[in-house]
Amino acid sequence: MEKRNIEILDLPRERIDEIEPLWNALNSHHQARSTHFEQHFSTFTFDKRVKHLNAAPYLKIFVAVDGDVFVGYCIASANESKGEIDSLYVQQGYQGARLGQQLMDCSIAWLEDQKCTQISVYVAEGNEEAMPFYERFGFKPRFQVMQIRR
């Protein structure tokens, strides 16, 4: 991979719409890999996700920027002592450049600054290959949630 001058920036909550193309790519990734819930991802829209995220009292969006193009993002939210990595995506062609690591480092540091003593990340069914990545940050599996989708 060629050397790029990529910056990690703090994106104001009001500009969340600017990551929609990346979020849609992540949603398509989940849909393609899901063996049981592809219908969920086919009807899950960015607007629905933003509505849920906007309900969080504290929200932080970090973006990886190559020039003036967003190539990755991480969204974290905090509510009292509980934090969550809500969404993380790095565009193909930029994966392997440690951008996910940098985005996670920024997000976890922000959650710690918010005094979160419990930080969670949910890994979608079909995306289990991401689990070793999260384990490198200290995340451990706690629950296996099973669901009937009708």
Image: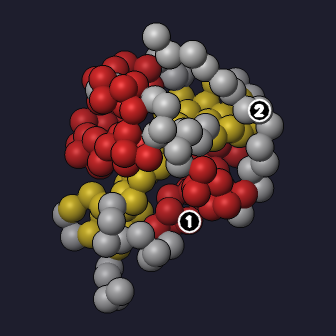
Residue 92, image quadrant: bottom left
Residue 7 image label: none
Comparing labels 1 and 2, the label whose residue is closer to the camera: 2
Vertical order, 13 against 95 (above or below): above
Question: Marks 1 and 2, how far apart in space?
Answer: 24 Å
Work out whether 84 lies above or below 135: above
Question: What x and y, as percent, mark residue 24?
Answer: 28, 41
Q: Residue at x 30, y 48 (%)?
A: 25
Mark 2 nearby-residue class (10 Å; few <14, some 14–19, many ≥20) = few
Which is more N-terminal, label 2 or label 1? 1
* Figure quadrant of residue 39: top left
Q: Give percent across and percent down for residue 45.
A: 29, 26
Pick the front one: 121 or 125: 125
Q: Which residue is painted at 44% across and 76% down in the image? A: 97
- In front here: 127 or 45? 127
Residue 36 sits above or below residue 43 on the image? below
Mark 2 sits on what residue?
143
Q: Quadrant of the N terminus?
A: bottom left
| Direction top: furthest residue | 150
Disc 1 target residue: 101
Q: Residue furthest left?
A: 68
On the question of residue 36 being in view, the answer is: yes
Coordinates of residue 46 in the picture (x, y in percent): 29, 30
Going 32% across and 43% down the picture, which residue do you hit?
28
Q: Residue at x 31, y 89 (%)?
A: 2
Figure check: 102 above or below 120: below
Tell me if 45 is positioned left or right of 37 in this view.
left
Q: Quadrant of residue 117?
A: top right
